Amino acid sequence: MRKHIPNIITCCNLVCGCIATGAAFHHHFATAFVFILLGAFFDFFDGMAARALKVSSPMGVELDSLADVVTFGVAPSAMIFILFGEVRYPELLYNKFWFNVMPCLAFVMAAFSALRLAKFNIDERQHTTFIGMPTPANAIFWGALISSSEGYLTSPMFNAPFLLAFEVLACWLLVCEIPMFSLKFQDKSWSNNRLRYVFLVLCAIILVGCAVCGIADNTVWRMLSRGIAGCIGTYLAMSIYTGVKNKGQYA
């Protein structure tokens, strides 16, 4: 039974991804985001459980990637698909052709997420750091953004070409050759983990600030979701800056 525990946890991730996808198609963005977060929780612990129980296997690695494609690829793509049906279209694109084509482009992100995961599985450089944005970070960002800021994204200040441009940027970040730090601690020392500690402190400040603002106007969940999106943005900014500065050698 012990050898099946990590795979059971991975399947919980997969089920969360399926529920998130279904919720997205029914326009329940907040629910979709919650299940993406739950999927990320299970994704974090399945590998840890496999190492702790000493039952790692090639099957577990493959199952983990398949689950991640659904939770962190298909689910956020489904959210973007629905959003394309609500977002404003400029006059040049205001016709039936683009109304049908634009939403389908949302699933390009699912394809790039699968490509990112396939590269991760065979890339020997990604044991302690990442090359390109991790799929959970991408999915959490989109889930947080769409569930908390749908009003802005569907307002006249935003439109379909902007949404497509942001999606293309996210797809590029998934497969780019930019090194990005991992939150896996090899030890607890400051010298070996200062970037991780700084990031966690910044995240705490962002989330506490958002929670306080949310309490003030009774929108705690919305503000926390925006804070989570801000944390992902901070992660990307710190990774890119540190990667360029240290040429991928994280301290």
Image (cartoon, rainbow, N blue to C red):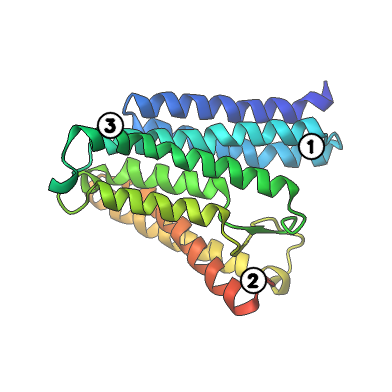
* Mark 1 vs mark 3: in front: 3
Disc 2 residue type?
Arg
- Residue 105 percent location from the top left of the image: 38, 39
- Residue 179 percent location from the top left of the image: 62, 64
Q: On screen, 138 above or below 18?
A: below
In the image as oriented, which residue stretches furthest toward the bottom? 245
Disc 3 residue type?
Asn
Q: Is residue 130 left or right of residue 231?
A: right
Q: Earlier in the sequence, mark 1 or mark 2?
A: 1
Q: In which quarter of the view is residue 8 placed?
A: top right
Q: Earlier in the sequence, mark 3 or mark 2?
A: 3
Q: Residue at x 48, y 67 (%)?
A: 237
The crowding category of the residue bearing disc 2, from other C-alpha atoms within 10 Å (few below 14, some 14 to 19, many at least 20), is: some
Q: Is residue 15 left or right of residue 104?
A: right
Q: How many marks are shown on the rendered structure?
A: 3
- Residue 113 percent location from the top left of the image: 55, 43
Q: Residue at x 44, y 63 (%)?
A: 205
**Label 2: element kind:** helix
Q: In which quarter of the view is residue 251 placed?
A: bottom right
Q: Residue at x 52, y 50 (%)?
A: 137
Q: Which residue is mark 3?
A: 100
The crowding category of the residue bearing disc 3, from other C-alpha atoms within 10 Å (few below 14, some 14 to 19, many at least 20), is: few
In the image as oriented, which residue stretches furthest toward the right? 54
* Mark 3 vs mark 2: in front: 3
Q: Which residue is mark 2?
A: 194
For the residue pair 193 and 106, the one nearer the viewer reads as: 106
Q: Earlier in the sequence, mark 1 or mark 3?
A: 1
